[in-house]
């Protein structure tokens, strides 16, 4: 059954996942093209100085890319389920309704995670050409909440798309919109350090949010 | 014979609007029940409750003895479900969707599915979403046949089918159900040809059940009498035995479960002058319209 | 599971509401509070206060009003440029002849905000050549870090400079430095009069001064009293060259570290808390003016040139929660959450109480209202106990949240 679920979810999201990962890589490529140019024109010492003491986020262009990924994968995976209420087919499969949803969700999470890990790995590898570990760690602390924002966006999309009542979709979107901003606040490098454990926990908790919408759907809210 | 589906005292409202109150439905094992009703009479509501997509205000539906609100996976595997409009995962092609579903059902029988698919003129990689209405319906039906369930719940299966194909399909379905002892619960708002399929009929109108019995019983006991009244001011509608009455000027169509003798006597005893009294033979569709009214 | 998911969503909604609603409230109703600007006159040896507003007023401690012109003449050190232009600068003050260069050289100004301490700190610093023989400082090509040793990394190649690293590590080791460093403070900028290197605290809380002089390491271990630990160090570059830095101890004492003698001198300031007080340190020819600004008061301590206290002034003003808008706030909101805080550059979950208990009334009213709503929906109250408790505790946030993500679970 796992195989079948994975198969269906993969058919839905594969091109979006690949497309997003390519987009993310292109974004990273642009970021490091700028770094390369900065090194060529200002020299390494000046470039480091701007990062260390002038608050420059050389990876600032990357800010919304993980968020975009969460939105894309979430929509690609859950929108086709709600067209003509196809989710009924999913719930009719010989599996517990929550279980089948969570199986789909876990596949989405793993896919998104894989894409993010690739991007993060590429980011760290490219950074290590130009910067020492201290600067890389600080950069990773800065970009980490952006990846969490991507997951939160993915979880909220699932919640909103599966919600059967339009008015509630609107309210949820409002909550989601405000909530996601807490991941992308400060431009100060490494400022998110103290918040990362709490934000990670909240993000993990949000992963089951979609069950609420699904429940409302199954009980015939309209 | 035991009941596969048993709905007891089903009551549902949408907000303050009543759909029905204390509805009781029984579907015998191995029988084919047709739930007939006009649009909005509560057919889809019933289907949704049966499939656990709607919690009724009160009452319950049991399928194989389990409450339809929380069916176990094993029981769900015994139920084939055709969603109104032949909805399927249209982002797949016919190979992908077969591969997907086959992973869920131990009794998966791909042969009837591929037999149906071979008759479709679709390319192997064509997505279901790009197929015609009729082709999509066959994909959806083929999948249910392959699932090989004990109970088929078909919500408006005839929608979008060509008349010829509809008849072919009905004949096939009946043959299949009877030879393999399948139980079918189907709804339709196209009544034509249903007579060929169903064993029992359940006719719903807004807020109530008009008839629930074997179709043969319904077709023999429900009758239509035509006659012309002398005085078109006479009001027969209030009479208890009159289930429905259609009048055009002084021409009357009277629908009742009572016998010809009873009606003739009633007219005589009450001094209602009429002429041309005759019983008219009905098809199921005529009877349905006669019972539910034209509006 | 679906109950858990709803509960999580309710919590998320409460978090979002407790961030947005107070923000909107303050945006709409908060009024600015004007803190007094207090200076010490070397003419009268007394305080003069500027109160910004319409109109801006100038007064002394007793409330006597002065014109702007009079005020400026009372504070010739602060306003000497203006007084020079208008020709009203006295020739001598306290028997001292007034010399432009003298005044300028003795002026110092430093301002501290809690967020200067509560912020992510760089771990890499450029070590300037202190005696390059050039007129201006030049940014080196390498940056140092002090982990298990002191390492210099070339920024162009991202490679460790082994020789320089070993040289400095050995020097630090020789002076008893315990690796790694816990604090490195300096002025990593070329825009300073000269370079004085870095003040570095090691893992044993000892303080070192490290410079690069003519390509060679300069290390000096500073003698600290037993048990003294620093939580913040502000290196300064003043023309009078009297001290290297202001140092805040864990106990919120303010020290200076004198140049050359490396003597720690404590300022007689008691009301300071580095976590939430702003500090203004102004020095001139005659005095040091230490201003501690907290949420509800301004404290001004005047020191002489020997850092002895000569006068002090204190003024209180109502904190936000005592003002009208703050009182109303405390009747509506139990607390507020923010991801940002004015005393920190970090992002964190900053909870702040509303400063009153008035919200309890609203919370109870909302519990009653929610109860009534449940009754109208013919809900079984037993299944809503957690919701009601949430409303009781979180008030308006919980009420909105539980009604947004409605508890419609069936039997």
Image (tube, rainbow, N blue to C red):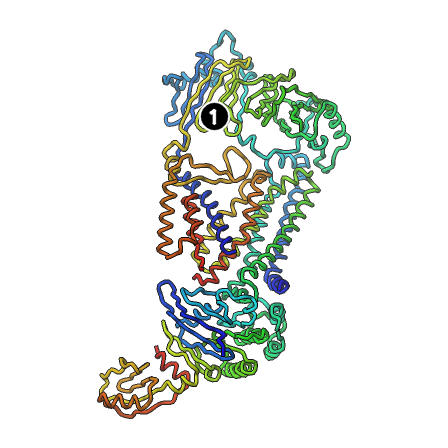
Farthest bottom residue? B276
Label 1 chain ID = C
Q: Is residue C223 left or right of residue C24?
A: right
Give me the residue at 44% from left, 79% from top.
Answer: B190
Q: Position of residue C15 (x, y in %)?
A: 48, 45
- Against B92, residue C264 (above or below) is above
Give me the residue at 75% from left, 29% from top.
Answer: C164
Q: Position of residue B218 (x, y in %)?
A: 40, 84
Residue B159 visible from this viewpoint: no
Task: Compare residues A83 and B145 and report the one nearer the observer.
Answer: B145
Residue C287 visible from this viewpoint: yes
Q: Quadrant of the N terminus of chain A?
A: bottom right
Q: Position of residue C154 (x, y in %)?
A: 72, 34
Q: Quadrant of residue C328?
A: top left
Q: Which residue is disc 1 drawn over?
A: C293
State the SS at label 1: strand
- Against B54, residue A167 (above or below) is above
């Amino acid at each position: 059954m796992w195989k079948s679920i994975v198969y269906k979810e993969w058919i839905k999201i594969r091109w979006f996942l690949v497309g997003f990962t390519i987009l993310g890589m292109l974004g990273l490529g642009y970021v490091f093209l700028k770094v390369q140019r900065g090194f060529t024109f200002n020299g390494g010492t000046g470039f480091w100085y701007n990062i260390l003491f002038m608050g420059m986020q050389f990876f600032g262009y990357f800010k919304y890319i993980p968020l975009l990924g969460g939105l894309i994968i979430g929509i690609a995976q859950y929108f086709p389920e709600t067209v003509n209420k196809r989710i009924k087919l999913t719930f009719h499969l010989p599996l517990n309704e929550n279980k089948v949803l969570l199986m789909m969700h876990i596949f989405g999470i793993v896919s998104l995670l894989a894409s993010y890990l690739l991007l993060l790995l590429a980011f760290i590898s490219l950074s290590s050409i130009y910067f020492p570990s201290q600067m890389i760690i600080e950069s990773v602390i800065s970009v980490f909440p952006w990846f969490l924002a991507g997951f939160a966006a993915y979880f909220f999309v699932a919640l909103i798309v599966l919600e059967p009542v339009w008015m509630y979709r609107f309210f949820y979107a409002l909550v989601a919109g405000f909530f996601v901003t807490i991941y992308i606040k400060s431009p100060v490098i490494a400022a998110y350090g103290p918040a990362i454990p709490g934000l990670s926990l909240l993000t993990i908790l949000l992963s089951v949010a979609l069950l609420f919408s699904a429940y409302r759907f199954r009980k015939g809210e309209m | 014979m035991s009941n596969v589906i048993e709905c007891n005292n089903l009551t549902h409202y949408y907000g303050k609007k009543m759909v029905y109150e204390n509805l009781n439905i029984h579907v015998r094992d191995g029988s084919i029940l047709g739930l007939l009703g006009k649009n909005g009479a509560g057919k889809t509501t019933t289907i949704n409750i049966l499939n656990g997509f709607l919690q009724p205000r009160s009452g319950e539906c049991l399928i194989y003895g389990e409450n339809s609100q929380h069916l176990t996976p094993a029981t769900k595997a015994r139920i084939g479900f055709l969603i109104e409009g032949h909805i399927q995962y249209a982002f797949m092609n016919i190979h992908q969707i077969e591969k997907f579903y086959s992973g869920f059902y131990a009794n998966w029988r791909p042969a009837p599915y591929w037999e149906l698919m071979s008759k479709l003129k679709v390319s192997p990689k064509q997505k279901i979403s790009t197929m015609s209405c009729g082709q999509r319906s066959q994909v959806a039906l083929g999948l249910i046949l392959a699932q090989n369930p004990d109970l088929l719940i078909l919500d408006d299966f005839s929608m979008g089918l060509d008349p010829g194909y509809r008849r072919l399909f009905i004949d096939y379905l009946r043959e299949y159900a009877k030879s393999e002892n399948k139980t079918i619960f189907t709804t339709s708002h196209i009544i034509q040809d249903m007579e060929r399929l169903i064993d029992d009929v359940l006719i719903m109108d807004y807020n109530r059940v008009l008839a629930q019995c074997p179709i043969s019983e319904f077709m023999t006991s429900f009758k239509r009498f035509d006659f012309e009244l002398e005085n078109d001011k006479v009001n027969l509608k209030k009479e208890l035995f009159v289930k429905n009455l259609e009048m055009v000027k002084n021409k009357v169509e009277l629908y009742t479960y009572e016998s010809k003798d009873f009606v003739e006597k009633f007219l005589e005893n009450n001094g209602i002058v009429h002429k041309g009294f005759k019983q008219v033979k009905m098809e199921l569709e005529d009877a349905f319209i006669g019972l539910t009214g034209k509006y | 599971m679906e109950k858990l998911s709803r509960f999580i969503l309710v919590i998320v909604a409460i978090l979002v509401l407790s961030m947005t609603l107070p923000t909107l409230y303050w945006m709409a109703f908060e009024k600015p509070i004007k803190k007094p600007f207090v200076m010490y006159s070397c003419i009268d040896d007394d305080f003069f206060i500027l109160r910004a507003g319409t109109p801006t007023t100038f007064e002394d401690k007793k409330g006597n009003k002065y014109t702007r012109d009079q005020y400026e003449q009372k504070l010739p050190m602060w306003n000497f440029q203006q007084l020079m232009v208008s020709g009203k600068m006295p020739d001598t003050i306290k028997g001292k002849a007034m010399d432009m260069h003298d005044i300028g050289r003795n002026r110092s100004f430093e301002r501290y905000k809690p967020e200067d301490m509560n912020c992510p700190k760089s771990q890499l610093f450029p070590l300037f050549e202190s005696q390059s023989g050039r007129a201006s400082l030049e940014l080196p090509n390498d940056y140092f870090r002090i982990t298990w040793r002191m390492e210099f990394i070339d920024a162009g190649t991202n490679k460790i400079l082994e020789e320089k690293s070993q040289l400095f590590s050995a020097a630090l080791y020789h002076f008893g430095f315990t690796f790694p460093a816990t604090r490195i403070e300096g002025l990593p900028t070329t825009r300073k009069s000269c370079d004085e290197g870095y003040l570095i605290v090691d893992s044993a809380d000892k303080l070192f001064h490290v410079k690069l002089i003519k390509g060679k390491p300069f290390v000096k271990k500073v003698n600290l009293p037993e048990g003294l630990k620093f939580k913040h160090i502000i290196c300064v570059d003043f023309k009078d060259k009297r001290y290297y830095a202001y140092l805040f101890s864990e106990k919120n004492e303010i020290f200076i570290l004198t140049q050359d003698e490396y003597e720690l001198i404590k300022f007689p300031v008691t009301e300071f808390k580095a976590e939430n007080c702003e500090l203004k340190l102004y020095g001139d020819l005659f005095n040091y003016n230490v201003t501690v600004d907290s949420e509800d008061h301004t404290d001004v301590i005047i020191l002489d040139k020997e850092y002895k206290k000569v006068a002090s002034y204190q003024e209180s003003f109502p904190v936000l929660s005592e003002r009208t808008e703050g009182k109303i706030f405390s009747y509506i909101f139990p607390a507020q959450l923010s991801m940002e805080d004015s005393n920190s550059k970090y992002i964190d979950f900053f909870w702040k109480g509303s400063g009153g208990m008035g919200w309890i009334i609203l919370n109870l009213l909302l519990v009653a209202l929610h109860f009534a709503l449940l009754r109208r929906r013919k809900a079984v109250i037993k299944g809503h106990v957690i919701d009601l408790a949430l409303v009781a505790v979180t008030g308006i946030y919980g009420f909105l949240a539980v009604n947004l993500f409605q508890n419609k679970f069936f039997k």
